[in-house]
Amino acid sequence: MPTHHEIPATPATMVLGYFDAALPPVLTVESGDTVTLHSHPAGGRASLHPDPARHPADYLAALDALSPGLGPHFVTGPVHVRGAVPGDVLQVDILDLKFRMDWGFVAILPLLGTLPDEFTDYETIHPDIDAERGVAVLPWGTELPLDPFFGILATSPPPAWGKVTSPVPRRFGGNMDNKELKAGTTLYLPVLAEGAGFYAGDGHGVQGDGEVCITALETGLTGTFRLTLRKDLAHDGPFDWPFAETPTDLMSIGLHESLDEAMRQAVREMIRHVCARTALTRNQAYMLCSLAGNLRITQTVDGNKGVHMLLPKSALPNGANPGTL
């Protein structure tokens, strides 16, 4: 029977600012087990709430214990899945997301964001999170519906890469900042190192496509995931790059320094998956993407920019596999 595990947000269970296949696992699970993990927001002391009474004690302990690394993100993990080897695929079912803070922050920061030369009057705000009503309350009174997700979901990078900075999303996932990767979504990540090495962090309360000023509503989240090793989805096929599906849509993910190239990758990956699930030719899949696929800018601020395509499963021809693989 699958086992459930819980990982607290302590300095011993997370790293700050990087991924590394050489890190020992904080937990080793069997395929099909579920894991609840806790996380802290990115940002550091400069982003703390003005009211010290609202600082979580474990967040302060992590700030004290962990030296700033290659990036600003606390990431919980790595979690190893027994038997995972390079060439496998890790299926991550996002089962539940909960807030563990009643505030978050949004910031304009030096040399970052989509318009860094135009916005040099740097500022940080601390919206309240009203989880009971399901809204974030901005300082000027606007209320936005909460829509939580983890900005970072990743497997370990290849061992040959060594320490890899957390801000730039890559083939192993990482800081994708994709708001569609929320509860009810399934993410497929290539396994590039022994054990897979699953990480999660960079909790967001709500974000627009693009994340243009550099931050979403940065906050602490608790997430529950089912981790399933998929040796039947060899990543030298359609799963050699992150791919996801929601209850209603297939989702391809493109990541590149060039927004144009990220877009081309998202289209190319969706064509591959449509061809793998159906009897359509590559030409037919391309035309279907033009008729029913919806390209969205994921984020424009993380070094490698992101574009994802959502294709309704209802658009797949009869006899195709529309559900979770």
Image: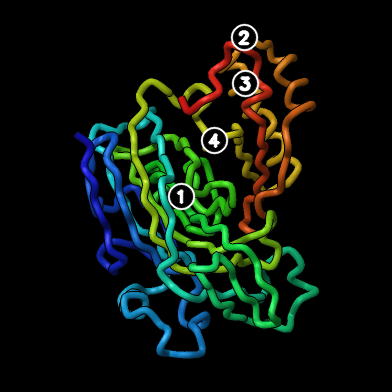
Residue 248, picture quadrant: top right
Residue under label 2, please give it: 279
The amino acid on which the numbered mark 3 sits, given as a three-letter code, is Val
Any mark on residue 274, and which?
Answer: 3
The image shows residue 312 at horizontal and vertical percentages of 66, 30
The image shows residue 66 at horizontal and vertical percentages of 34, 73
Q: Earlier in the sequence, mark 3 or mark 2?
A: 3
Foreground of the two, 144 or 62: 144
Any mark on residue 247, and which?
Answer: 4
**Mark 4 residue crowding within 10 angstroms, few (<14) / some (14–19) / many (20+):** few
- Judge whether residue 163 can be spotted in this image: no
Q: Is 128 placed left or right of 271 in the picture?
A: left
Q: Earlier in the sequence, mark 1 or mark 2?
A: 1
Q: Earlier in the sequence, mark 1 or mark 4?
A: 1
* Residue found at x 58% / y 11%: 319
Q: Secondary structure at mark 3?
A: helix
Q: Secondary structure at mark 4?
A: loop
Q: Nearer the viewer, mark 1 or mark 4?
A: 4
Q: Quadrant of the N terminus?
A: top left
Gap between marks 1 and 2, in whole Å? 32 Å
Q: Secondary structure at mark 2?
A: loop
Asked whether the beta carbons under mark 1 and mark 3 sit within 8 Å of each other, the answer is: no
**Mark 1 residue crowding within 10 angstroms, few (<14) / some (14–19) / many (20+):** many
Q: Is 323 placed left or right of 318 in the picture?
A: left
Gap between marks 2 and 4, in whole Å? 22 Å
In the image, residue 63 sits, relative to residue 86, either above or below, namely: below
In the image, residue 70 sits, relative to residue 310, either above or below, namely: below
**Mark 3 residue crowding within 10 angstroms, few (<14) / some (14–19) / many (20+):** many
Q: Secondary structure at mark 1?
A: strand
The image shows residue 17 at horizontal and vertical percentages of 44, 63
Residue under label 1, please give it: 153
